């Protein structure tokens, strides 16, 4: 059994809770801009001291509303400054937040509120309130539903004016490290979401140790970021808390279509993103260049960037000719992309899915070091992450301080340490099943290199076994195909079938640009595009590229382009944009059967 454990850098404090992180930040730098909120065409700073003042005032409001220490309060909202304000106010009031994805259905909201035993709920908008209203009659424990857009924060703050500071200080100090800090429900790619009990220690110790490991990212003077990933997910929630501890100035942009303008005005030094964001940035730049007649230049620049980064990572000398090309393309291409992202980004932390070496090397040559990491809700987000001073593209890095990672005999990744959750809420059977002698079973398959850098190859339950007995990890095929600009999502199938095939959807955002660049009507419908020969040829090209990385037995022999999209609203994606494989396979069982009912026709794999 291969195992790597990294000792904690910061000694554990059994009395500490999350509020202590803000208290110490205010003591150290009260006038430091901890947040910035949109104002006109720019941003207005909120200092650490002002944030704490607002937190305490809102905590008083929760106390005045009858929220008792230990009680659970649901929160359903987009990623805005108010998210952190409500989060810390509930911590200060001694309460436990139960975050709910703002895209959740009424049934999902009901399940989470009911299962958690939450007694109040705060939502952002009237649309959110309408969802709650549908199931309010089935939630007898819920006493209050507040709405941000109707001035809930101001109303609560005013109502709490009579509560003494000493009461909030008393409440703030009630929780110790081992107590529950939050109850986060898994996004539910299979079955009903389970509530993960994350403790104050999980956040505090992981935050303090991660800040040391990522010192160059979060602790450098002027460090800043714009959050746009949903803060209801543990990944962004952890980063939000880490930023408070490290003194990172944080802005928010809940509308990803407005992300580039936000980056341009905010000018962050690092980003938190998922691979799909980097794919979109690259693909948009490529198609824009193609539309301007400079596609050949962009592709040459991309090739030079990737080669340049590979040689640097391998410690090899850069040939003179490549140096000249790189310098030229830096002026023509790379500098424009850097400017589009604000001009100051040095690092990006990426998680939730493999990025792929191509994009990693491309952005590295732009001056953006993408630090891929790995973790789950049950590990309070990161268990491993590449470091600023030592990263390996294509891996998710070594274990963080205070964390141990090992591989079981079947290759399953198991985690133990300061970040591992306490239990599943009201589910002792699932809790017992999730642990192997104290190590959390992640359900993912991976491998280590000699230095302990982890590579994740796929989900254990998603491994496909063909009729010929070949084990196939879908991610190895899906990730490179999804990198193509016109492809939205991919699901590889073939369990107990004679060959591997795939269901593919088109990206409705990128498709019009690609169609226009290729002399086709930009307003072509998804239905027409899915059967268009030029579109099919482009999808075939993406499949061919992916097939080059695997053996013949693992290669995709056939694919079907669907005339629909998989979205969170359709029930086929989780809130973090992961595919719900079992749902897709069930909903598109007819399309899958049709693939295997017809004779194999392929242009790229000879069938003997």
Image: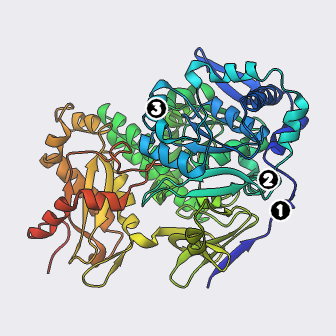
- Residue 372 x/y as whole percent: 58, 56
* Side of 569 where 112 appears, left or right: right
Q: Is residue 419 visible?
A: yes
**What is the spatial separation of the Cα atoms under label 3 and label 2, in whole angstroms?**
40 Å
Helix, strand or loop at label 1? It is loop
Of residues 170 and 212, the one drawn nearer to the viewer in this rendering: 170
Label 1, on which residue?
9
Between label 3 and label 2, give the one nearer the viewer.
Answer: 3
Label 2, on which residue?
208
> Does residue 494 sit above or below 341 in this rendering?
below
Instruction: Give the image's coloring scheme.
Output: rainbow
Label 3, on which residue?
133
> Does residue 394 sit above or below 487 in this rendering?
below
Residue at position x 16%, y 35% in the image: 520
**What is the spatial separation of the Cα atoms under label 3 and label 1, in whole angstroms?**
48 Å
Q: Determine the residue located farthest toward the left in the rendered image.
A: 599
Q: Quadrant of residue 477?
A: bottom left
* Side of 17 where 365 appears, left or right: left
């Amino acid at each position: 059994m291969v195992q790597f454990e990294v000792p904690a850098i910061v000694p554990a404090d059994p009395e500490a809770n999350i509020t202590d992180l803000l208290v110490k930040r205010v003591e150290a730098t009260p006038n430091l801009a901890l947040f910035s909120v949109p104002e006109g065409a720019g941003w207005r700073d909120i200092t650490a001291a002002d944030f704490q003042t607002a937190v305490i005032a809102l905590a008083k409001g929760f106390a005045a509303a009858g929220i008792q220490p230990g009680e659970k309060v649901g929160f359903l909202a987009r990623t805005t400054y108010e998210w952190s304000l409500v989060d810390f106010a509930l911590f200060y009031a001694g309460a436990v937040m139960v975050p709910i994805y703002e895209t959740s259905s009424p049934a999902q909201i009901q399940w989470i509120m009911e299962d958690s035993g939450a007694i109040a709920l705060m939502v952002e908008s009237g649309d959110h309130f309408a969802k709650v209203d549908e199931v309010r009659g089935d939630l007898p424990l819920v006493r209050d539903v507040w709405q941000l857009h109707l001035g809930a924060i101001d109303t609560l703050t005013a109502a709490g004016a009579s509560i003494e500071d000493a009461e909030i200080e008393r409440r703030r100090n009630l929780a110790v490290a081992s107590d529950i800090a939050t109850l986060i429900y898994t996004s539910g790619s299979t079955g009903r979401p389970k509530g993960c009990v994350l403790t104050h220690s999980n956040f505090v110790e992981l935050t303090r140790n991660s800040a040391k490991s990522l010192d160059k990212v979060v602790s450098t003077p002027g460090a800043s970021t714009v959050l746009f990933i949903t803060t209801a997910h543990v990944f962004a929630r952890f980063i939000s808390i880490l930023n408070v501890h490290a003194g990172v100035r944080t802005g928010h942009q809940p509308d990803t279509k407005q992300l580039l303008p936000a980056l341009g005005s905010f000018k962050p030094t690092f980003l938190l993103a998922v691979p799909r964001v980097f794919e979109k940035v690259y693909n948009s730049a490529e198609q824009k260049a193609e539309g301007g007649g400079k596609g050949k230049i962009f592709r040459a620049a991309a090739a030079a960037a990737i080669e340049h980064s590979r040689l640097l990572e391998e410690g090899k000398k850069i040939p003179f000719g490549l140096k000249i090309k790189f310098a030229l393309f830096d002026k023509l291409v790379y500098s424009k992309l850097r400017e589009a992202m604000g001009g100051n980004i040095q690092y990006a932390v990426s998680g939730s899915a493999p990025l792929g070496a191509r994009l990693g090397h491309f952005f590295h040559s732009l001056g953006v070091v993408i630090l891929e990491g790995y973790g789950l809700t049950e590990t309070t987000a990161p268990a491993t992450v590449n470091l600023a001073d030592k990263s390996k593209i294509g891996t998710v890095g070594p274990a963080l301080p205070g964390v141990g990672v090992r591989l079981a005999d079947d290759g399953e990744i198991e985690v133990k340490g300061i970040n591992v959750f306490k239990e599943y809420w009201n589910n002792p059977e699932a809790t017992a099943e999730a642990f192997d002698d104290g190590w959390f079973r992640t359900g993912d398959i991976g491998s280590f290199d000699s230095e302990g850098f982890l590579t994740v190859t796929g989900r254990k339950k998603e491994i496909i076994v063909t009729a010929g007995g070949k084990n196939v990890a879908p991610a190895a095929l899906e990730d490179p195909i999804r990198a193509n600009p016109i492809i939205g999502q991919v699901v590889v199938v073939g369990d107990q079938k004679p060959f591997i095939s795939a269901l593919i959807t088109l990206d409705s955002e990128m498709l019009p640009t690609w169609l226009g660049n290729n002399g086709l009507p930009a307003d072509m419908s998804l239905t027409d595009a899915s059967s268009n020969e030029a579109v099919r040829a482009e999808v075939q090209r993406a499949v061919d590229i992916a097939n080059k990385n695997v053996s013949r037995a693992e290669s995709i022999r056939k694919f079907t382009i669907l005339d629909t999209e998989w979205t969170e609203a359709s029930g086929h994606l989780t809130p973090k944009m992961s595919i719900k494989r079992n749902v897709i396979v069930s909903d598109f069982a007819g399309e899958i059967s049709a693939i295997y009912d017809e004779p194999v026709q392929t242009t790229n794999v000879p069938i003997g």
